[in-house]
Amino acid sequence: MKIYNTLTRKKEEFIPLEEGKVKMYVCGPTVYNYIHIGNARPMIVFDTVRRYMEYKGYEVNFVSNFTDVDDKIIAKAAEEGSTAEEVAQRFIKECKKDMSGMNVLPATTHPLATQEIGGMIEMISKLIEKGYAYRSEDGTVYYRTRKFKDYGKLSHKNIDDLQAGHRDIKVTGELKEDALDFVLWKPKKEGEPYWESPWCGGRPGWHIECSVMSRKYLGDEIDIHAGGEDLIFPHHENEIAQSEAANGVEFSRYWMHNAFLNIDNRKMSKSLGNFFTVREVAGKYDLQILRFFMLSAHYRSPLNFSADLMEAAKSGLERIITAAENIRHLQKSAPDLELTEREDALLKEAEIYTEKFEAAMEDDFNTADAVSAVFELVKFSNTNTSADHSKGYLEKLYRQLLTLCNTLGIIIEKEEEMLEDEIEELIAKRQAARKEKDFAKADEIRSLLLEKGIQLKDTREGVQWKRV
């Protein structure tokens, strides 16, 4: 299996630190609003990498964080008159709903930045002790960028050409020893959440969070660190500087980054009016279509999102699902006989599509070619299945298609639709729970219905529902 390593700028054979196991960290979203389709790409891409690793028999420890303390979260809370914690918790919940809709598996661990402050203070103290960090007059702690001799090795930038990371706290130059130094800990501002530390009451800088959470849940050294290409600099570059200075070992063996998502051939931007959340897309399309669309291109290639391309993805996915339904339909009345020589020969012939699928995924997770192999298997099954074939033959062919689709996270076995009586019964239970002020139970029922494809709308006339 070959992976393109951003660190070395070439494809390398994947050799795990520990045989049969993979330690993988993927930077998660900052939760101040619904996730947008740009956030969705790394979620889908690296979920597929994880699924393929598991398909190959690896035990994957997959960690993906939620940044739940940040300027944007604090601003949102101020705008709403709520707290940063309330905003973060609400949008973590909404993010998980969207992830479920895209069939993104829950991480082994989803750490929250606010629950790991102690570890951050510990790592910052260690960096100060080693001379890699210092406290300024106002209590801000900075990382001495130039002291880390390998700074720039991931982004392949020359340190003398760099400017300080754009997400760092804005301070006067006198407080820093060097303009390139970045923030590890920042002092509190009036009305903002803060934690006590040896330097001042405040909160961590963005970069230290991932270094600490990765170390806690995966160890000093990990196999794969991944995220969008916008994170290469400064975020991942700074993570390397912090982690390797503190831990004394290489941080991550392989660095994987997905390319940007454009909208109608333009960069996604609120100012251009082409900014879409996953929830908005879900109002028009099943999120399985969004997943299928994302897998239609290699993860390192820029991907263009448009209505035409989504319609094409919808048609492609329907072809696969129809082929699967056809095999299942034939299975119901197929004779339960031993496989014929001809059927054995056909199954051997079909193995080439699994081989093509694996060859594509082994070559830096080329999902575009893997999807092509699935389409070839679909064409083969459409041509070579009929009411005359045995149950065993049809089952094996179906199992092959199901396995490949599951590895891509594509669902071809849809649950049966809920009956109207069942929906109304659950709505009645939700109403009773609301009347008793058991809002947790009411929310649980609403989420359950949404998972089953039933969307509720509370109106003055009562609860309305529709299938989505």
Image (cartoon, rainbow, N blue to C red):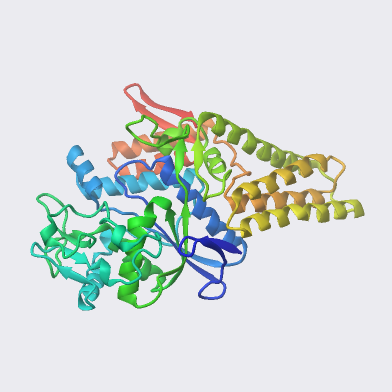
Judge from the rendering whether residue 146 lies leftward or rightward of residue 364; answer left or right. Answer: left
> How many discs appear?
0
Q: Is residue 40 above or below residue 226?
A: above
Q: Position of residue 85 (x, y in %)?
A: 24, 50
Q: Is residue 386 above or below residue 152?
A: above
- Quarter of the image for residue 20 reads bottom right
Residue at the top extreme of this rendering: 461
Residue at the right extreme of this rendering: 341
Q: Is residue 422 above or below residue 412?
A: above
Q: Position of residue 220 (x, y in %)?
A: 38, 74
Viewer-side residue, 112 vs 207: 207
Viewer-side residue, 200 vs 234: 234
Judge from the rendering whether residue 181 lies leftward or rightward of residue 430; answer left or right. Answer: left
Judge from the rendering whether residue 369 lies leftward or rightward of residue 250; answer left or right. Answer: right
On-image quarter of the N terminus: bottom right
Residue at 33% x, 70% y: name it: 243
Residue at 60% x, 52% y: name it: 366
Q: Position of residue 121 (x, y in %)?
A: 22, 69
Residue at 37% x, 66% y: name it: 214
Viewer-side residue, 340 vs 130: 130
Q: Position of residue 461 (x, y in %)?
A: 35, 21
